[in-house]
Image (cartoon, grey):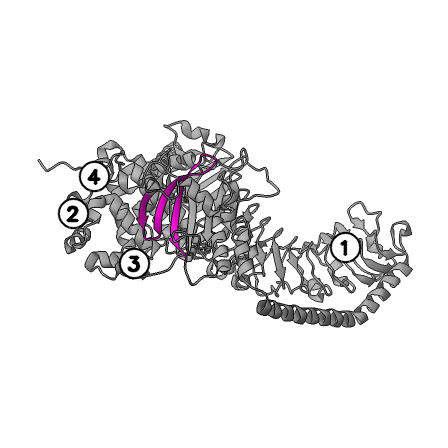
Amino acid sequence: MGWCCLFLLFCFTWSFFVLGTYPLQSSQTQVLQQLRKHLEYPKQLEIWNNRSIDFCYLSSFPQVNITCQDNFVTELRVVGDKTAKVSGFHGFAIPKQTLSENFSLDSFVATLARLTNLRVLSLVSLGIWGPLPDKIHRLSSLEYLDLSSNFLFGSVPPKISTMLKLQTLKLDDNFFNDTVPNWFDSLSNLTILSLRNNQLKGQFPSSILSTTTLTDLIMSSNGMSGKLPHLSSLTSLHVLDLSANKLDSVLPKMPKGVVMVILSNNSFCGEIPQQYGQLSQLRRLDLSFNVLRGKPPSAVFSLPNISFLNIASNMLRGSLPDHLSCGSKLEFIDISNNKLMGGLPSCFSTNSEKRTVEVDGNCLSFNTRHQHVESYCMEVYMKKQSKGKNAGILAGLIIGVFILTMLLACGFLILWRIYCPVGISEQHLLHKTVQDSSAAGFSSELLASARFVSEAAKSSLPVCRSYSFEELKEATNNFDNSAFMGEGSYGKLYKGRLENGALVAIRCMPLSKKYSIRNLKLRLDLLAKLRHPHLVCLLGHCVDVGGRDDFSTNKIFLISEYLPSGSFCTHLAENSYGKVFNWSERLAILISIAKAVHFLHTGIIPGFFHNRLKTNNILLNEHGMAKLSDYGLSIISEETDKCGAKVEGYKSWQMKNLEDDVCSFGFILLEALVGPSVCARRDALLLNEIASINSLDGQKRIIDPIVQATCSQESLSIVLSIMSKCISLESCSRPSIEDVLWNLQYAAQIQGTVSGDHRFDTASPQ
């Protein structure tokens, strides 16, 4: 009977496991393989080469752990070996330490977002680099996120605040260099927050005080400054580590249940609060390397659970009581490098093998060979008292001298403006190279830290400089008709050859009357600093107001790199002289330009908007790389609305919204879908056809046959959807350029993975 029961139990258990096992969905497997490709095939993922492997049973590998529930991936942990850190990371790929310069964190996160059931994500020491995109919030089921020991920089994405299920957030050992986020109170389930060893700055975030679920708060080795508020409201807090910052307030009150407090290497002042002697659960307290004063509370030494106490390298004074008692678990005490006097308490006996005591650098009567003499401590004390008395007089003297200097400077400036001619200095500005570090509306600090400055440093293109009008006349054979390339909304365009043999494009624009020469020079400086792989590079400029002849009077000349392979528009028409692009090639160009526009919007604060985007301004170099031209010119040109005033209907709507980059990009998407000839129509029929473009019949009627023959239906649908949103009449319903870029990258991924059997069917029904 017993054997029968055991057999039945075995059968039941076996059936439970068999019935409870589900094969991983093919789409999930495909996403994992794409992630491996994004991570550039690290050796930790070599096991994935085996096509027959079941990803859900990789938990036995220490560096790779995948957990599945039903047929979805719920947990992904990968630990790499790119742990080496650099002293200065400037936002670009570093060989053998980061992933290559071809890595796109934006695309990587977009692929991750397809693991919709993911609850645990840990990607550590994999060389991931770049600014963490906002779309990380699309992993809405995440409960645990760990991206430590990578090369992430910029700001911590605000959209993380919408990940309401998040319980653990670890971004240690990266290069985040914006202000500390202040939205943590939105994460109602957050228990562990660790941002150790970054470059975050600003005040301690007040929102943390409302995050009462926190048990671990670790933000050491950053640049936080200012006051640390009382933390007694964090009733669940056990671990607090804010060491190696620039906090300079008095020490705050702590929650009663705290176990570890590390506040070393700051500038905390005042006395150690008596309340610290009531923290019965406290095991480790480190307040070293601050400017704390007064006498340390005796109760701190006798806490029942304290095992580590470090108050070294402060300005503590007074003497410790002889009858001071030490907690039974206290194993390490460091009071060195203070101004403590008197004898050493008996519980500090150095004869104990279970307790380490450091007392050097005080004025104690114990072991005087390693102590300061008492007179020294008293002398320092008296000096500081006298300095305090004279501080008010010195401060008043400094303020008085400063005010007098400012008044003299203001008077001199007023006299200089009245009696000195401005024209000479403004003309002198025109002959300087474009190297200044400030422009109208932007501080030098902002320009120095803006991301486009780093892009410029990476570029191999020459530094933008000032050209003389004679140099341009020689380059264009005195602006001969043979050098004329065309005329657009920003003036005439010429092709020229510089003295060094380089081919350039020279744009001639009318000089805006609303800017002084000085202000115009600063605006040109700002344009010159824009560098991106998908922006046509500005090589120089010429502003000639000398009036030598009619041609040169009141004109600006912008000298840019010359791209020989024509515009995107010329490669969309069937009767073009060059190659007509298929769907994948069009997507690649659209993604490149979306990246350029995204850079213009976010590469500097405030961004460059109103770039008058159109397919004629998307140029191709000899390698087929797409670059955006005529960007940012609105800051130096005359703004007019004449271009759309005389047309009606569809074209009027298009021109009215041309200043909106997202709307303009929507029409570029439309032209890539239907071709330039169809998009150029201005009749109401086109509006009706666009409205029906989401149906298969509408697509077959209006979409370019080349697109239909080379695209997948899913990829096409994604682009159609985002295009419709971009050209929406309601500006508030248009997406951001980041959303547009994400959808285009997703469409390209779909296009790259879908087989030929799923291509768009253009044949007539049989």
Q: Of callouts 4 and 3, which one flags the residue occurring earlier in the amino acid sequence?
A: 3
Instruction: Measuring from the top left, give residue 535's x and y in whole percent.
Output: 41, 44
Image position of 386 (left or right of 252): right
Main secondary structure type of the part rendered in magenta: strand
Q: Nearer the viewer, mark 3 or mark 2?
A: 3
- For label 1, count other residues whose C-alpha is less than 10 Å away and answer few (under 14), some (14-19) or many (20+): many
Label pair 3/2, CB-CB below 8 angstroms: no
The front one of 31 and 23 is: 31
What span is colored magenta in the figure? Answer: 485-511
Q: Can residue 203 be seen in the rendering of this structure? A: yes
Label pair 2/1, CB-CB below 8 angstroms: no
- For label 2, count other residues whose C-alpha is less than 10 Å away and answer few (under 14), some (14-19) or many (20+): some
Give the alpha-carbon distance from disc 1 to disc 3, as whole Å: 64 Å
Q: Quadrant of the C terminus?
A: top left
Label placed on residue 313: 1
Q: Of callouts 3 and 2, which one flags the residue occurring earlier in the amino acid sequence?
A: 3
- Amino acid type of the residue that numbered disc 2 sits on in the rendered structure: Gly
Image position of 2 (left or right of 145): left
Residue where numbered disc 3 is placed: 657
Label placed on residue 698: 2
Residue where numbered disc 4 is placed: 708
Residue 318, compared with residue 700, is above or below; it is: below
Q: Of callouts 2 and 1, which one flags the residue occurring earlier in the amino acid sequence?
A: 1
Give the alpha-carbon distance from disc 2 to disc 4, as whole Å: 12 Å
Examine the structure image and report whether residue 123 is included in the region drawn in magenta. Answer: no
Give the alpha-carbon distance from disc 3 to disc 2, as whole Å: 25 Å
SS for tag 1? loop
- Please count the marks in the image: 4
